[in-house]
Amino acid sequence: MSPHREQGVLSRWESHLADERRLSPHTVRAYVRAAERLLEATGDSDFASLAQLEAPALRAQLARRRADGVSNRSAARELSSLRAFLSFARAEAGVSDAQAPRLRGPRIKRTLPRPVTPDEAVHMAQAIGERRREEWTGLRDRAVLLLLYGAGMRLGEALSLTGEHATPGETIRVTGKGGKTRVVPILPAIRTAIAAYVSACPHDLAPDKPLFRGSRGGPLSPGLVQKAVAEVRAEIGLPASATPHAMRHSFASHLLGAGADLRSLQELLGHASLGSTQIYTEVDAARLLDTYRSAHPRERDG
């Protein structure tokens, strides 16, 4: 294999993922690494030869990965990234049918997200705001959590807001996965929380700079929010499943329980497919079943 030709393939693939599909840096790294492993295993170094690979080559690569000890979920992600890579390779090679080889992936157990209750969400936001030594950082953390729970934002989306969002209206346009934008509602309580943080923040919140800042003025790190949430949930007795992302799950499941339709929920969450949103129908059904089991007299009597 020619190292130069291999690097050319990987470089073009990385550019496609980052610049054209606008995937996150973490996803780009994972996809490129999976492609690199395939090139190392097959000895292919150009798009023309990659375009000739069929299902047996993918099956063999998955077998190698399983021999390395990866889980079913990791193997499924590997297969997804390799199919995307081979579709890209076929298109680059000018093959008329650019569809990647079909191969049934490993079966993985589907786990339901665990939403917190509305009272728990509000309690967590209040508690996280009260535990900081400096008032402005407490107000900052509270505003971030309310954006997750009250607007359904991902943590990365909330932390990507800039100073131009310091005085939001009833909605905010955010950029989510894959560079896709959507409009999310900003409730009065969230606007009030953001205003309180902005008023207390000692740093200059220029329109083109991050809205949420660390103690020294740099962008607020997701790790700091995750750590603060972990400490607070332990203090107030919430389970380990009460993560920042669980706040977004709660937003979705509570809206569905209040009668929101799946299409509207898909738009609010920024899901690329309706299938990603449909899991919340299972969450809602699971919650109803729990309520039934705890409330029904025959269930209580055992």
Image (spheres, rainbow, N blue to C red):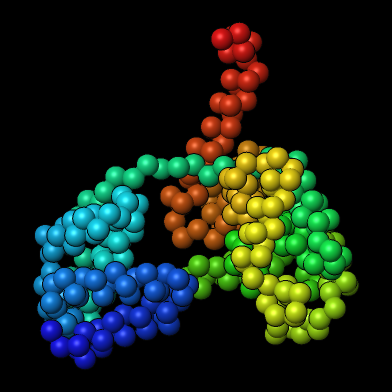
Q: Quadrant of the C terminus?
A: top right
- How many marks can you see? 0
Instruction: Estimate the x, y position of residue 217 in percent, counting from the top left.
Output: 75, 80
Residue 215 seen in this snapshot: yes
How far across and how far down the image is residue 106, in percent?
Answer: 26, 48
Left or right, 166 with reference to 2: right
Residue at horizontal 63%, vertical 55%?
244
User: In the orientation shown, which residue stands out farthest toward the bottom?
Assistant: 4
> Which residue shows up at 57% across the image and 57% down it?
269
- Which quadrant would the N terminus be assigned to in this image? bottom left
Whether residue 149 is situated above or below residue 282 in the rendered picture: below
The answer to whether 255 is drawn above or below residue 180 in the figure is: above
User: Where is 197 relative to 44, above or below?
Assistant: above
In the image, taking residue 256 as reference, residue 277 lies left or right, namely: left
Q: Which residue is at a point 19% across and 60% down the rendered structure image?
A: 64
Q: Position of residue 90 (x, y in %)?
A: 20, 75
Say if residue 102 shows up in the picture. no
Q: Position of residue 211 (x, y in %)?
A: 73, 75
Specify the quadrant of the image occupied by residue 226: bottom right
| Of the pair 275 and 238, the residue shown nearer to us | 238
Q: Residue 156 vs residue 138: left or right?
A: left
